[in-house]
Amino acid sequence: MKELSEEQFQRYARHLILDEVGEEGQDKLLSAKVLCVGAGGLGSPVAVYLAAAGIGTIGIIDDDIVDLSNLQRQIIHATSKIGAPKVDSARETLSQINPTINVRTYKQRLTAANIQEIIREYDLIVDGSDNFETRYLINDAAYLNGKIVVSGALLRFEGQLTTFRSGLKSKRDEPCYRCLFPNAPSANSSNRCEDVGILGSVAGVIGTLQATEVLKEIIGLGETMSGKLLIFDAMNMQFRKIRFKRRLDCVLCGDASSIKDIT
Ligand code: ZN
């Protein structure tokens, strides 16, 4: 374990005072490498909280530029950044919050062609993407490369959160994203924010919960969200938790899976 500097003692004082975190937990955060897929509604609060918490290396991948219509919920970006690449805007905000961490940016779309090379560098992936194609891509690559995924999703006044860690050899009996959603909805039933709308702060609720689960997974705190889907309903201010299991017939992690390398 590395000795914390005087600056780090002050910066992370409210973590260090928690017996369950302490210097050992903070050291785990400082050594951790987390990739945020998307610097949008979910990625904004996730990256801000992870940077503030002292995650040593944060990767951000997004090929988009900041648009005026993003600012209603994507709190990492400012009006002055309209027209700038989201990854550049995000990096600047994070460096203001915590200049002592590493931020790596990828101004590109995550695809089957680049995902292996990118996620290899990280321990944990935060899925803040807005489409099923990317979610399956992340799930499959994480499973095959031994990475944990903390997944969030948004829809109008609702949000969802779960964690997948069946990529870890010791967690092979836990479910993956394809166990939860074996089939993607048809192309015309789009659930993207830009098509159906989203109450801005709902993105903040789910993104902040994702950041919390990332910190818990890295430090090894409390109960995992693996095998559990949290559904947040802002209209009725209700949280429901549904349990789900690995599907024996899952095309990725099931007993008869023939998929060896689909990325
Ligand atoms: Zn599965």
Image (cartoon, rainbow, N blue to C red):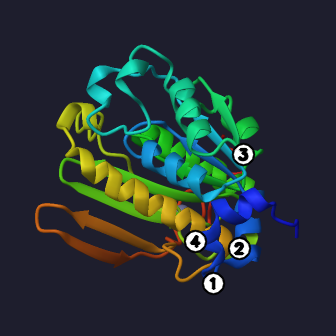
Asked whether disc 1 touches disc 4, contact meaning CB atoms under 8 Å apart, the reply is: no
Q: Earlier in the sequence, mark 2 or mark 3?
A: 2
Looking at the image, residue 20 lies above or below residue 166: below
Quickly name the residue at label 4: 14
Q: Secondary structure at mark 4?
A: helix
Q: Which residue is mark 1?
A: 20
Counting residues from the N terminus, which is met first, the one under dot 1 or under dot 4? Answer: 4
Quick one: SS at disc 3? loop
Closer to the chain start, of discs 2 and 4, is: 4
Type of the residue with mark 4: Arg
In terms of sequence position, does the residue under pointer 3 or pointer 1 come before the other? 1
- Mark 1 to mark 4 CA distance (whole Å): 12 Å
Q: Residue furthest bottom?
A: 19
Q: Amino acid at mark 2?
A: Gly
| Viewer-side label of 2, 3 | 3
In this rendering, the answer to whether 251 lies above or below 128 is below
Q: Secondary structure at mark 2?
A: helix
* Front of the two marks 2 and 4: 4
Of labels 3 and 1, the one closer to you = 3
* Residue 158 vs residue 52, the one in the foreground: 52
- The amino acid marked with disc number 1 is Glu
Q: Element under label 1?
A: loop
The residue drawn where x is 63% and y is 69% is 13
Is 191 situated above or below 67?
Answer: below
Q: CA distance from mark 4 to mark 3?
A: 17 Å
Relative image position of residue 157 (x, y in whole percent): 18, 53
Q: Quick one: label 1, few (<14), some, or many (20+) residues within 10 Å?
A: some
Residue 25, label in figure: 2
